[in-house]
Image (spheres, helix red, strand yellow):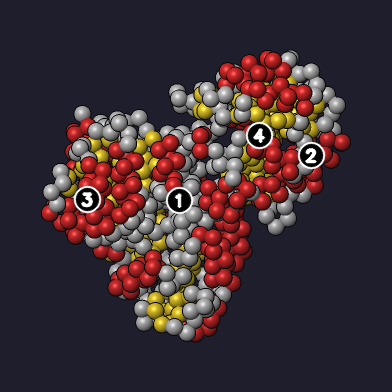
Amino acid sequence: MNLHEYQGKELFAKFGLPVSRNAVITSPDDILSACKDIGGDKWVVKAQAHAGGRGKAGGVKLVDTPEEAKEFAKHWLGNRLVTYQTDSNGQLVSSILVEECTDIAKELYLSAVIDRGTQRIVFIGSSEGGVNIEEVAEKTPEKIIYEPIDPLTGPMGFQARKISKVLGLDNEQTKQFSKMLSQLTKLFISYDLSLLEINPLVITQRGKLHCLDAKINIDSNAIYRQPEIQAMHDPSQEDPREAEAAKSDLSYVSLDGNIGCMVNGAGLAMGTMDTIKYFGGSPANFLDVGGTATQERVSKAFKLILADPEVKVVLVNIFGGIVRCDLIAEGILAAIEEVGVSIPVVVRLEGNNADIGSDILAKSDAAIESLNNLEEASKKAVELSK
Amino acid sequence: MSILVGKETRLLVQGFTGSQATLHSEQSIEYGTNIVGGVTPGKGGQKHLDIPVFNSVHEAVEEVEPNASIIFVPAQFCKDSILEAADAGIKLIICITEGVPTLDMLIVKKKIDELGVTLIGPNCPGIITPGEAKLGIMPGSIHMKGSVGIISRSGTLTYEAVKQTSDLGLGQSTCIGIGGDPIPGTSFIDVLKMLEADDQTKAIVMVGEIGGTAEEEAAEYIKDNVSKPVISYIAGQTAPAGKRMGHAGAIIAGGKGTAADKIKKLEECGVHIAENLLQIGTKTKEVLG
């Protein structure tokens, strides 16, 4: 799960990390008083949406008057922000963050991730901030430091000094950074983060470190124990079908094609998409019905797939390990009856109780192609999608 | 021979009396697995499936001497259950449960490495040595004793590889699903090392997927350390970037972890690539000659 920048900064502030004075508004009328409350004579207004590259897309602006801020808010609120990281629909802007203007002397980069290689939380720092870090890593790898944190010791002073050296900090800043590193690690662990990125982390004209941005992702597996994060969830930032799927505990990702897929297991679901492509078709979605697929969940999955108007045929591919194929067969029939499916359905059942499942489908009146060979089933689905 | 599990395996089931554990324990027993006990705190002293239930792994170890444990407890309790089994001295632990928080696994992994414990999973189908023992949720009937060792990050994709190699008469030595999480207890390399040393294994099938760099690291390892032919299929060639494809670990992030990158690296290191999942079996047969 992702957070908005303003939510990330709320968490930063809570952990004593330096962020700008700010306010969040959801109506253009509130922005004048927000600017006054913050004070100063320049403000930065930032469209809040789950997307990287907001600045380049016009979603961030430096304004000289509260009226200008209001114009910005009028333009963006309720509008969709399209950046190089979003699809062509973009992301809904549901609020605007107004901040006091910061005088920047230098822009740096700092992030923390759970690194699979070292199996540690790793901090990544660079003297090059405000730019795409992947590019820095490629062109000038010497400007980046990767520092893994031992879970037993937590971040140590020497590690803060190591990172500070690469960031080019002076003695005072290094002391400030040492505290930041410790607080960021606490924040990372307390909220089960999977990513924390401050790009840019800046040095102000007065020589202080300051967090100008806050990007936070939370480990979805740990959301259950993070009530504060749950309350920050913004459903407007999600694909409506993906959000609907998540409610039923189904993994669903929208794609561009016209063959709806219902598969058990994430790997096989990807493999099925690849197979469709291999035979010249195009998958409409990724959908994993999961390990404990009940009849209700299968029905739900069917409804999700059929809600996509592009879908011309549905390919169901089940290899029963945990899932019993007879349950899936009953679910398919129940869903077809409940939803009233008017497009062809190709089903491939294999594994646990596959014979019983195939029997159930064969004996039904529904228009189902039941093939227990994935190659034939995929080819059939592709043929029917043309 | 085979690896990690066989006729000598004495299995303990943690979370034994739950519905999933019960279903899969019944199937494992039917397959011939020797389940010696189960653990469900608060239900010690009872019998379930005619097998004794204990309140703790320590009690079970004392009474029935298991040498492996399989875990079916809910995700929020897995850290505790894995560490309990490890603390009680069990050296092979399989965690089936999906959804374990990554930071829990970060601690667990450090601890089990310290204790010299092999953990398979979490979020995995388990491990099977065909004809000997099934410690997991895979359908036993598709397996056949044979010469192919199978390692995979995905459950159902493992079954595809198994079925194909069975249908072609090759069979399997041992099949291990290492799981789809960012921090798995056992890596591809750990299993490659064991399969390379196993006499029964003549070829190795490695099923990977998008996300992370485990396949690339395995490729490097294979180049220098594995003499047996390795056949690989990578799922997610059509997956979009930035989206988690079900498994917590299956995501192309920052342009890294694509199927194309992995396939390229594997090919460079001499691994045979099955372009499509339907070709895993035929490719293996072709390589074995």
Question: Label 2 lies in what chain?
Answer: A
Write down the residue under mark 3. A333
Question: Label 4 lies in what chain?
Answer: A
Say few, some or many: other residues with alpha carbon within 10 Å of mark 1 (under 14 / 14 to 19 / 20 or more): many
Residue A206 visible in the shown view: yes
Residue at image position (19%, 60%) is: A356
Q: Position of residue B270 (x, y in %)?
A: 40, 42
Task: Please identify, in this view, whether the residue under mark 1 or under mark 3 is nearer the observer.
Answer: 3
Of residues B77 and B288, the one nearer the viewer is: B77
**Circles 2, 1 touching at the beta carbon (< 8 Å):** no
Q: Residue A304, located in which quarter of the rendered image?
A: top left
Between discs 4 and 2, the one toward the N terminus: 4
- Say which mark, if any, is on residue A6: 4
Q: Residue B58, located in which quarter of the rendered image?
A: bottom right
Write down the residue under mark 2. A177
- Label 4: element kind: helix
